[in-house]
Image (spheres, rainbow, N blue to C red):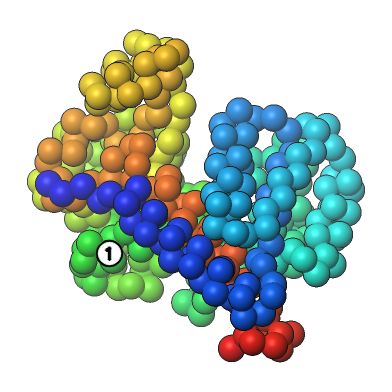
Amino acid sequence: MGVLDGQTLARQIREQVGREVTRLREETNRTPGLTVLMVGDDPASGIYVRTKHKAAGKLGIRSDLLLLPANASQSRVLERLRQLNRDDGVDAVLVQIPLPNHLDTWAVLDEIDPCKDVDRFHPLNLGRVMTGRADLFPCTPAGVLRLLDHHGVELNGINAVVVGRSFIVGKPLAAMLTNRHATVTVCHTRTRDLAARVREADLVVAAAGKPGIISADMIRSGAVLVDVGTTYLDERSEVEKLCPPDQLTRFDRKGNAIAGDIHWTAWEKSSWYTPVPGGIGPMTVAMLMENTLELFRARGRRLQWPGMS
Ligand code: GUN
């Protein structure tokens, strides 16, 4: 079994983006700008948005973190997005999901200028992904495919099982795998016999957000395992049940650790697997950096900035 090391590949991609940001700044005197908007104070989302904001800053991307209170009204959020759409210094806008319940998530995502939609969650961009006409892809599915391609994992003709049907991961990834000629089964909470579906898989992508839901007995020997799950655990007993023994020492201050959806005991049955942490998480951030750079470039081409080809 080989490790699909997202940490290392993500670092290489971030470095490449950083070099390109520097080169373009010297050539055009402009810097890509990313704005990350979060509403409320969900602790896991807080960790993700700060990670994204910090990563951008390190690459020379101008990054703004906008934090709105949990009770911010729909009209306030929409007005803020309209301002960002008009702002010439902003190339890329990201609204962290989930939003508080009183907000209409689709109405919020619809408001982002599709040309600044770095997550590609606007229906126009998701539609392009579905029909195989996209130039950019949602960050997590893009990170999954980039990591598999980097290690030469064959997709053509394989049985792929995607567990989870969110618009953030499962649905776009299912379309992207289909466009790469995999036979794709999408499983979810109402799937009758999850184990039977997963046992048929050459590739399992788990994106359910339910730690350990995929157990070793469900895995066909030699399958490729991709784990998108990142659930923060704070009970030491949960960590002991769900995480490989080395996480107990790596995250020992309060017994906090991150658990994936695939139980670690399944790894030894696989041909390739992504660890948690250090698999898809860093790839998502790297793809966000790459998408930000690409939106900057695309805007430069549209507006015919000097020095931009
Ligand atoms: N919440 C979980 N994953 C994501 C993501 O990739 N983008 C955004 N905006 N929110 C998320």
Closer to us: 197 or 264: 264
Query: Please, what secondary structure does the residue beneath circle 1 have?
Result: helix
> How many residues crowd mark 1 within 10 Å: few (<14), some (14–19), many (20+)?
few
Check the image and report above or below for 127 versus 272. Answer: below
In percent of width and height, residue 247 lies at 30, 24
Q: Is residue 14 visible?
A: yes
Q: Kindly identify the residue that appears in the image at 22 percent across and 62 percent down.
A: 151
Check the image and report above or below for 138 versus 39. Answer: below
Q: Kindly identify the residue that appears in the image at 40 percent across and 29 percent down.
A: 258
Closer to us: 190 or 258: 258
Closer to us: 188 or 271: 271
Q: Quadrant of the C terminus?
A: bottom right
* Relative horizontal placement of residue 158, taking residue 242 as reference (left or right): left
In percent of width and height, residue 140 lies at 46, 54
Closer to us: 192 or 272: 272
Give the residue type at disc 1: His
Q: Which residue is mark 1?
A: 150
How many callouts does the rendering have? 1
In percent of width and height, residue 243 lies at 29, 25
Q: Kindly identify the residue that appears in the image at 33 percent across and 37 percent down.
A: 276
* Relative horizontal placement of residue 67, taking residue 42 as reference (left or right): right
Q: Kindly identify the residue that appears in the image at 68 percent across and 58 percent down.
A: 62
Q: Is residue 127 visible?
A: no
The residue carrying mark 1 has its beta carbon less than 8 Å from ligand 1: no
* Relative horizontal placement of residue 241, taking residue 179 as reference (left or right): left
In percent of width and height, residue 133 lies at 51, 79
